[in-house]
Image (cartoon, grey):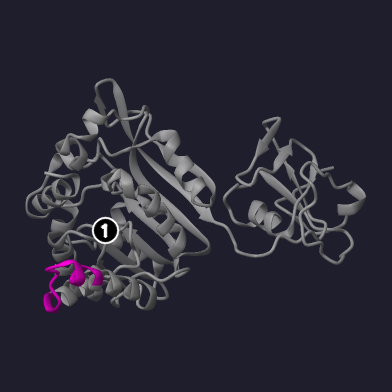
Amino acid sequence: MNVTSAVKQRYSEGANEVQDELCCPVDYDRDLLKLLPQEIIDKDYGCGDPSRYVREGDVVLDLGSGGGKICYMAAQLVGTQGRVIGVDMNDDMLALASKYQSEMAGKLGGDRVVFHKGYIQDLALDVAAMEDWLADNPVTDAASLEHLHHWQAEQRRERPLIADNSVDLVISNCVLNLVDDRHKAQLIREIHRVLKPGGRVAISDIVSDEEVPAHLKADTELWSGCISGAFQEEAFLDAFRQAGFLGVAFDRWDSTPWKVIEGIEFRSVTLTAVKGVDSPCLDYGHAVMYRGPYAAVTDDEDHVFPRGARMAVCERTWRFLTESGVYGSDFIGFAPATPREPVNFCAPPGTRRSAAETRSGKVAGGDNDCCC
């Protein structure tokens, strides 16, 4: 049995009978669970709670949505102006999620959740539509296979399941580790594609502290159990950075491993990241100061910020460091004291702004309390 078949079988079993081995202990918001049918709660298999990153008004995409637990939790948080999209490949899990859709719409005061059948590593392909097409156009030879490939390409281009730049927040709960290693990089590129500029990621998943050896990866029981397909912890962060994300971080990292296999620790983490804003890098004269406590820090675009120095940045970087919320209160932002025509490129790395250039300009992230 290959990895894909093993995962499908394991989670079909989990949709019918509770599988205790498939989930880590998680402290979910009990208030959000009150509206949910007990069957969905019992047959949910996760390792974290990405719902806590949902904001009012968000368009949320849940990858590997399973029985819909996180989707229905998120639906309570997005409010009447938001919506939630669940994507899963398992028919039994989709049936479980859809079973309670009308009931949940009544409780929520509106139908703001939708579930789609799809591959999370290929979010443009509408698998349900493909299956309907195949019913009338079976693949029986090379020519019909080519016909299918042509239909898939057209469908992805003209009627993508999830459109480019259409989602505010992508969440997932213990699912990326189930994707074949060959498709993991494509999966993360797809997450980047569907997010709006400035869109966010909150991925709860299992990571390993060392590379998982081939003989463990070949164990379909371990793979379908969310273990041997895990990213190595540093590689998990690097994969999102390589896909173009900024502010990539472990927002949560369990100190106690969930499993230890052959001395390798497997634990739950929640990775957060942001898709950068696609705007030109224009230098108006902005600066930022890193507060400390470290001597210096480097961001994901290789800007270096010594502690206490007013460093030159473009307006786009200035806004990201001071307004996106990714860096909390780590930076103080200085707008130029005198407006000027922008330069199309950032100042050379290491360029500092003098106090005179930034004095009396707008300050972002400063402290207003003063005592004399």
Quadrant where the image shows the C terminus: top right
- 75 lies above or below 257: below
Quadrant where the image shows the N terminus: top left
Does residue 291 appear left or right of residue 118 in this picture? Answer: right
Q: Residue furthest top?
A: 263
Residue 209, percent across and down?
Answer: 37, 28
Q: Determine which quarter of the picture holds residue 220.
A: top left
Disc 1 marks a residue whose amino acid type is Ser
Residue 296, percent across and down?
Answer: 70, 33
Is 359 included in the stretch rendered in magenta? no
Q: Determine which quarter of the picture holds residue 146.
A: bottom left
Give me the residue at 27% from left, 69% from top: 149
34 or 54: nearer the viewer: 54
> Is residue 214 something that shows in the picture?
yes
- 141 lies above or below 283: below
Q: Residues within 10 Å of mark 1 (few under 14, many from 20)?
A: many
Q: Residue furthest right?
A: 356
Give me the residue at 64% from left, 55% from top: 320
Residue 88, percent across and down?
Answer: 24, 60
Count of numbered badges drawn on the protein: 1
> Is residue 250 something that shows in the picture?
no
- 143 lies above or below 87: below
Start-end of magenta stretch: 135-146
225 or 131: nearer the viewer: 131
Q: Return the residue at label 1.
A: 65
Does residue 220 appear left or right of residue 286 in this picture? Answer: left
Residue 54, percent across and down?
Answer: 42, 59
Give me the residue at 24% from left, 21% from top: 262
Give me the residue at 45% from left, 54% from top: 201
As helix, strand or loop, the secondary structure at mark 1 comes to loop
310 or 75: nearer the viewer: 310
243 or 328: nearer the viewer: 243
